[in-house]
Image (cartoon, rainbow, N blue to C red):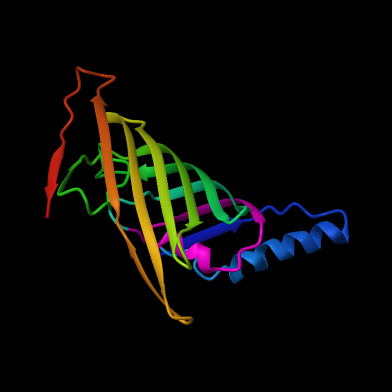
């Protein structure tokens, strides 16, 4: 069994040393923001955050026989991501946007859903027909931290994802899925070296699938996978 992985990262080279230095500082500033990846957005208020922006464009290709049954024989992904943070007065902001265009070849055992490995589904509808599959994903995320009384902070974290998938062979289907995460948070300073944080997470997910047959005269078998 053999698998091949190929990843290409196009880079836009700066024409002046000033631009290169600015790009490096942006990545370093992100690394210095200690709580930027925390689930508690209010913690950004306790970080020494500097304005920075990043952009990444990449291409990923993989092929081979060593894969799970519901994974494609070959897959490609064009990925774009941009992210940045800024401060407006004492309010600290961060946001990011990602786009993925995925093309799968030789997929089976997944008739309806965007992601057959999503553990939120208690069963899945599957067929044995080899087929191509096209998918697109949009991911938007926003964080904000505002100072409250004293050295306490309040925060808000919002994330929205919109995805669409289309199976190219009968029994074919088109599925649309979106999920929203909303998380308010607080951080309370205890003395000069300690903090106590809390956050509440609300999550909503919905996926709709519309199975169709382009050739209704040919009977197609589907199965329900449980467990």
The answer to whether residue 54 is magenta is yes
Q: Where in the figure is residue 198, as x and y percent of width and height? A: 33, 64
Instruction: Give the quadrant of the C terminus.
Output: bottom left
120 or 128, nearer to the observer: 120
211 or 213, nearer to the observer: 211
Which residue appears at 27% of the width and 42% of the height? 205
Which residue appears at 53% of the width and 49% of the height? 96
Lateral position of residue 28 relative to residue 195, left or right:
right
Lateral position of residue 107 relative to residue 155, left or right:
left
Q: Quadrant of residue 20?
A: bottom right
Q: Quadrant of residue 69?
A: bottom left
18 or 90, nearer to the observer: 90
Query: What span is colored magenta in the figure?
Result: 39-67
Lateral position of residue 44 relative to residue 134, left or right:
right
Q: Where in the figure is residue 26, as x and y percent of width and height? A: 69, 61
Q: Where in the figure is residue 190, as x and y percent of width and height? A: 40, 77
Instruction: Give the quadrant of the N terminus.
Output: bottom left
The answer to whether residue 216 is magenta is no
Instruction: Establish if 209 lies above or below 72.
Output: above
Which residue appears at 55% of the width and 54% of the height? 91
Q: Quadrant of residue 188?
A: bottom left
**Residue 3 is at least partly visible in this image:** yes
Instruction: Establish if 206 lies above or below 170.
Output: below
């Amino acid at each position: 069994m053999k698998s091949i992985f190929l990843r290409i990262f196009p880079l836009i080279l700066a024409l002046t040393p000033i631009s290169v230095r600015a790009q490096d500082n942006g990545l370093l500033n992100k690394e210095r923001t200690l709580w930027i990846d925390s689930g508690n957005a209010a913690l950004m208020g306790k970080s020494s955050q500097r304005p920075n922006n990043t952009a990444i464009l990449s291409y990923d290709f993989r092929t081979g026989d060593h894969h799970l049954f519901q994974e494609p024989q070959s897959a490609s992904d064009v990925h774009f991501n941009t992210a940045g943070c800024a401060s407006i007065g004492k309010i600290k902001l961060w946001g990011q946007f990602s786009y993925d265009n995925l093309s799968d070849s030789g997929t089976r055992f997944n008739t309806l859903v965007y992601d057959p490995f999503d553990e939120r589904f208690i069963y899945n509808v599957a067929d044995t027909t080899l087929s191509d599959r096209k998918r697109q994903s949009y991911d938007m995320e926003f964080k904000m931290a505002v100072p409250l009384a004293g050295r306490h902070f309040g925060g808000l974290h919002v994330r929205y994802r919109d995805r669409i998938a289309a199976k190219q062979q009968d029994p074919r289907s088109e599925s649309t899925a979106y999920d929203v995460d909303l998380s308010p948070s607080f951080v309370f300073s205890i003395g000069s070296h300690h903090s106590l944080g809390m956050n509440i997470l609300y999550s909503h997910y919905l996926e709709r699938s519309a199975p169709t047959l382009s050739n209704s005269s040919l009977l197609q078998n589907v199965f329900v996978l449980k467990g």
